[in-house]
Amino acid sequence: MKSPRYPSLYQINTRTFLNSLARELGRPTTLDDFPDAELERIAGLGFDWVWLLGVWQTGEASRAISRTRPDLLDEFQRTLPDLTEEDICGSCFAITGYTVHSGMGGDEALLRLRQRIKSRGLRLLLDFVPNHTALDHPWIKEHPEYYVAGTEADLLTQPQNYARLNTKRQSGILAYGRDPYFPGWTDTFQLDYANPNLQTAMRAELQQIADLCDGVRCDMAMLILPEIFERTWGRRPADFWPLAIESVRREHPGFLFMAEVYWDLEWTLQQKGFDYCYDKRLYDRLREGAARPVREHLSAGLEYQDKLAHFLENHDEPRAGATFPFKVHEAAAVISFFTPGLRFFHQGQLSGSEKRLPVHLCRAPQEPANPQLSAFYTRILAALKQPALRNGEWSLLECLPAWEGNWTSDCFVTYAWQVGEGQSLLGVVNYAPNASQCYVRLPNSNLPGHVVELRDLLSPAVYERNGDLLYLSGLFLDLPPWGYHLFAIKLGG
């Protein structure tokens, strides 16, 4: 199964999905109950990948933390006003083992679901959490040396980052999993990548995961880079990712690695072997609402951009429907999802959900669909099926002032997609709260002598222009605040 150059991914919160299905059916559900109709809907929308978030086994100790921390409980209560203790199943990133949760039917149920996913032309993505484990992972007893140990002084001065481990078999002080800028995640313990045996064990875990799926999304992948780990923990480990990725691909050619990554380390992880890295920088610039920083970001080389994953929301970010005003939301999507890289959509985004769901919960709030956003995303996904957007060549276009002294040309983001001589698309976005004008030169060299039809794939609009004038001076644009088009270009007689 050949993947397109620019695929699309759909993220599902597996625990809340099965919980909702169980309420509908009136009985417990497993992955075997995942409806064929839902898989066919996802495939029909044009997605290439399904990411099932949170399928791995979790434990009681980390779940107890989720059910008792006041700050977490406040967040849960805001999400679910009718919250019950059963709704709090613990973080899906506090993992006790890379076997499918027993309540979901175990590995066998996942393999059966994977076959159904594959039969519909889809591929399966699962989680890999390299930085930490749950508090009650078996390694705590069997291999305490796999974890970062602390001292009495650490516990005294940084109680937010260390915990005393007291069991019948052992005692000691271990570090909570964390990144260098925030307090520890108190439902996890930190793995020690300075220990070569730990790295060997984690490569084995990856191999086990790779037997069950087609790719992994690697949680906070930059935390175990040698320079980041050294900054956080004071010792420099060997580089984990290149060897780990290579060893998996020896057994599973074409296996996909996607990194959750921040701090402008996307290029670094791409060089380690990752197929895709989160493009958080583009997301942040879109939230800022100014065109020039977005254009500057998109001016990077395609060897970099092709390996970025673009999103307007995910389980960590707030809902796009609550973050972006409607017209800004539309304009941001026309930039984010029609530029090179992987197009990453989140469950609930297509219907306009506004409540972010904490990963500790296994029940989602019921929210009515936003008909405007639903209709908009229907058009977006239909357009993404265009061959040019899946396998074409992309270029960022320059906008020229419409007249001397008109600064609003700086408000545009414009780009072109081409598949040989067969299909040409033009994307134009006025990413500003004001009306803007400019001229944009089309990359087509064969415009003279033709009547040029510009048919918008996102609205009923159709325009005809003289090809000679377009070639000489470019296309004149006059768009309202946050206005946009995605034109299919057709040459007539």
Image (cartoon, helix red, strand yellow):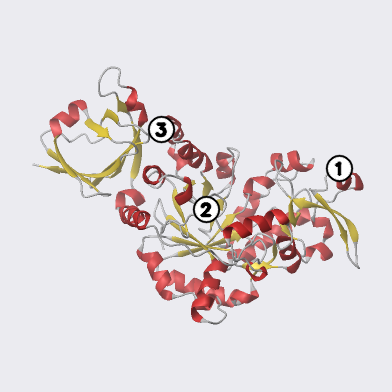
Q: Amino acid at mark 2?
A: Asn
The quarter of the image holding the N terminus is bottom left
Secondary structure, mark 1, is: helix
The residue that mark 2 highlights is: 314
Cα–Cα gap, marks 1 and 2: 35 Å
Q: Secondary structure at mark 2?
A: loop
Q: Which mark is residue 291?
A: 3
Measuring from the top left, give residue 304's x and y in whole percent: 48, 40
Q: Residue furthest top?
A: 404
Residue in view at x 66 percent, y 61 percent: 91
Label annotation for residue 157: 1
In whole angstroms, how far apart are the C-alphas of marks 1 and 3? 45 Å
* Disc 1 crowd, CA 10 A, few/some/many (<14, 14-19, 20+): few
Amino acid identity at mark 3: Ala
Residue drawn where x is 65% and y is 66% of the image? 88
**Which element carries disc 3, helix, strand or loop?**
helix
Q: Can the viewer see residue 250 in this picture? A: no
CA–CA distance in space, label 3 to label 2: 23 Å
Q: Quadrant of residue 410?
A: top left
Extreme residue toward the front, this view: 81
Left or right position of 348 against 394: right
- Residue 268 makes an appearance in the image: yes
Amino acid tagged 1 = Thr
Callouts 1 and 3 close, C-beta under 8 Å: no
- Where is 229 relative to 385, above or below? above
Q: Nearer the viewer, residue 243 or 445?
A: 445
